[in-house]
Image (cartoon, coloured by chain):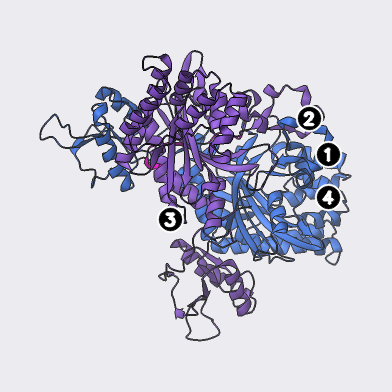
Chain colours: A blue, B purple
Amino acid sequence: MEQRVIDTLRNVFELNGFIGIETRAVEQGSSLLKKGETSKEIYLLSRLQEVGHESDTPIEDRLGLHFDLTVPLSRYVVEHSGDLAFPFKRWQIQKVWRGERPQEGRFREFVQADIDVIGNGDLPDHYEVELPLVMVSALERLREFGLPKATVHANNRKLSEGFYRGLGLTDVEGVLREIDKLDKIGADEVAKLLVEGCGANENQARACLELAELTAANGADLAEKFDALCAKHDIAADSDAYVLARQGLDTLAMIVDEAARIRPGSVIADLKIARGLDYYTGSVYETFLDGAASLGSICSGGRYDNLASQGNKKYPGVGLSIGLSRLVSYMLHAAGAHANRVSPASVLVAVWNEADRSASNVIANQLRARGIAADVAPTAAKLGKQIKYADKLGVPYVWFPSDAAEDGVGDEVKNIITGDQQPADARSWEPDTVYARQTVTVEA
Amino acid sequence: MEQRVIDTLRNVFELNGFIGIETRAVEQGSSLLKKGETSKEIYLLSRLQEVGHESDTPIEDRLGLHFDLTVPLSRYVVEHSGDLAFPFKRWQIQKVWRGERPQEGRFREFVQADIDVIGNGDLPDHYEVELPLVMVSALERLREFGLPKATVHANNRKLSEGFYRGLGLTDVEGVLREIDKLDKIGADEVAKLLVEGCGANENQARACLELAELTAANGADLAEKFDALCAKHDIAADSDAYVLARQGLDTLAMIVDEAARIRPGSVIADLKIARGLDYYTGSVYETFLDGAASLGSICSGGRYDNLASQGNKKYPGVGLSIGLSRLVSYMLHAAGAHANRVSPASVLVAVWNEADRSASNVIANQLRARGIAADVAPTAAKLGKQIKYADKLGVPYVWFPSDAAEDGVGDEVKNIITGDQQPADARSWEPDTVYARQTVTVEA
């Protein structure tokens, strides 16, 4: 299942011109620690010979496992900047590791599927609508596996920051962090936290909540409602704070209007989206599935202007990341499916006795040469046992080679689901596609 | 390149009925340490919060990264034995890590591609010829990427052990270890080491070398020459040592005869193959490429009867493993190719000015809907700059949307390699397959 999902995503990303890269799992501690907040979740490595002396090496000089695919991308872009054509659009689907205590539904090791576009010095803002739309079309393709419809919720850091500063608040990170809890703990609790922890008075706290709860049908509606809110809270249109907010607003309005034009209902403005990571500098995205609110965001990201740099050269980027392991778990659960150990083979070729095994091998090879996956019975056991083996493996057909001892009877193939048995020739027979196996990669 | 190689291997493995599994990269120290010899190369993990206290936890209770795919398979089989249909045939292609000091051409992190078949209690010996043949057919498919012909060299531990014991030698592991150096240091040096370190006298050492250098055209020839060697060194045909050796000989003779029948020249008997790992109990395999002796074995394995067990139940197995990263490095080097950052896109759609970007997006989406990977120019720069961007990305076609300002001129597409420019319709145009891009995954 996961493998088919990965193949589907890869196909969509490449259709959109993203280049696949793979980076090593192991990065320098100094790279991993840059990103602040999540640093507590890093797994550090030590060679067996170093046990007992690990602490001799400063953490920055030790090696650790990457905990996301953005930090490795930053390193990669800086290292290969001379060879890359910018803007550099890349997809990357790999495992990441978090050194946290495992909880139910949270893995220490999981797969992320990321797309990012990185500019050299600058990066046009049309990518801020194009990248979420690529993710939407990828998630749309996953609906064939039972995934519900996905909607991207977009916001903009500049909009929030400008508004908070316009209100006279200075602890912007703090306010964002509390607003992020809105869906979990409700407006009253958030207001309390804003007053207690972020230096807001009751009015300022309520204004932050009004912004978070603002909804709009389109870009113009959004701008109108935002301006009304600013007027209500005395944020002057010529203030630095308003100018900053307006930059964010214009980008967000462009995103929702352009997305509505190309794929209506795929991206909406949601002004309570805050995102925990402090490296986002503009657009931020979270993605929710219809009827799966408890799952939280399944695909998140944003624009970051300061993550990668080399001297005074900057590499701004826009990217989104799907938490693939969680998503696949959900799909398996929601679809009522489970990862059963199913053979990719369509056919099990029976073996009458060990001396005739090579005849069965010849048949299997004829089928394989025509792209039909085939297995051969492990032993010349009683026929019932061979059919039972096929059944346990989920192989729908059992092939009976012509028995040399029984004159005049040619090869036959039995569909063990329907019981139907027919004469067949390994050079031309095709399985009924209804029963042909799908390729399945099993989780562990 | 690596991705295409992986896709090819996966296809061959699944055509042969192997089930794909993926196991977590992280295993318990107690599992990882079981395997003895390579244990020094393990990377152990510690959470960032544990730094300075790592040694409080015994190594067995710590977590480490898997260094091969056999140890995880053993754990997997024991854990899921109730759900699996035995014999369980699985393929697995994943990264592994070795905590060794990096040297040139040796990676700390690399990809292995393994196939194994695991029996419950017993395992028929026909798998000892079938699995190397699956690997041969997989390697054969890689010849389209420039890989030379591969030949599997097979030996059998029982054959070697029986012969050594028949000679009166008891340090079987020691003798195997020294014989393994034959190609590197030559017969005289190996003889010296056998005398100095393994308790052999000059005659016994020479006899071991005679066995290692024995070659045979087929199974009968092998048996005849082996029996002559035993007679020469007074190993009685009714001795326990000979009986053991003869078991191994019979299996090896079956392997070379059966392989010669199915795929002549693919598997040969090579009695100096020893394999370093002490868990092999029967057949052992190494695989060499024509004209690439210095590369050493690219695909190795064998039969192991005692690796996985649960109480007094045993799970014997046969498996082979390709060191994929090394192989891909070699292929890139040998083919004179290099991992260039090439876009998967066949077409770059030009943008005349930012106001017309959406028209270009519509064209790109029409192409994508028909499976043609397309990119859109990042900015409405001068046309020369847009073509240069396509060229740098390796995109062969640039699409010129009809310019609304220029009446009567429709869409045109330019092949920037040949310079040919033609009218085109995004709903029907097809790229010339000669210039259509291949999907490329870049290494880092």
- Looking at the picture, do discs 2 and 4 lie on one chain? no
Residue A302: in magenta span: no
* 4 and 3 marks in contact (CB < 8 Å): no
Query: Is B103 drawn above or below residue B363 in the view shown?
Result: above
Amino acid type assigned to the residue bearing label 3 in the image: Glu
Q: Chain of mark 2?
A: B
Nearer-the-camera pick, A213 or B247: B247
Q: Earlier in the sequence, mark 3 or mark 2?
A: 2
Q: Secondary structure beneath disc 3?
A: helix
Q: Residue at x 76, y 29 (%)?
A: A51
Amino acid type assigned to the residue bearing label 1 in the image: Pro
Region of the chain picked out in magenta, as a range: B12-25
The residue under label 4 is A172
Q: CA distance from mark 1 to mark 4?
A: 33 Å
The residue under label 3 is B144
- Looking at the picture, do discs 3 and 2 lie on one chain? yes
A371 displayed left or right of B403: left
Q: CA distance from mark 2 to mark 1?
A: 14 Å
Residue B20: in magenta span: yes
Q: CA distance from mark 2 to mark 4?
A: 32 Å
- Looking at the picture, do discs 4 and 3 lie on one chain? no
Q: Residue at x 57, y 27 (%)?
A: B194
Amino acid type assigned to the residue bearing label 2 in the image: Glu
The image quarter containing residue B184 is top right
Residue A90 horizontal/vertical position (percent): 61, 57
Within 10 Å of the Cα at label 1, are there few (<14), some (14-19), or many (20+) other Cα atoms?
Answer: few
Q: Secondary structure beneath disc 4?
A: helix
Q: Chain of mark 4?
A: A
Outermost residue to the bottom = B407
Nearer-the-camera pick, B176 or B91: B176
Within 10 Å of the Cα at label 3, are there few (<14), some (14-19), or many (20+) other Cα atoms?
Answer: few
Q: Chain of mark 1?
A: A
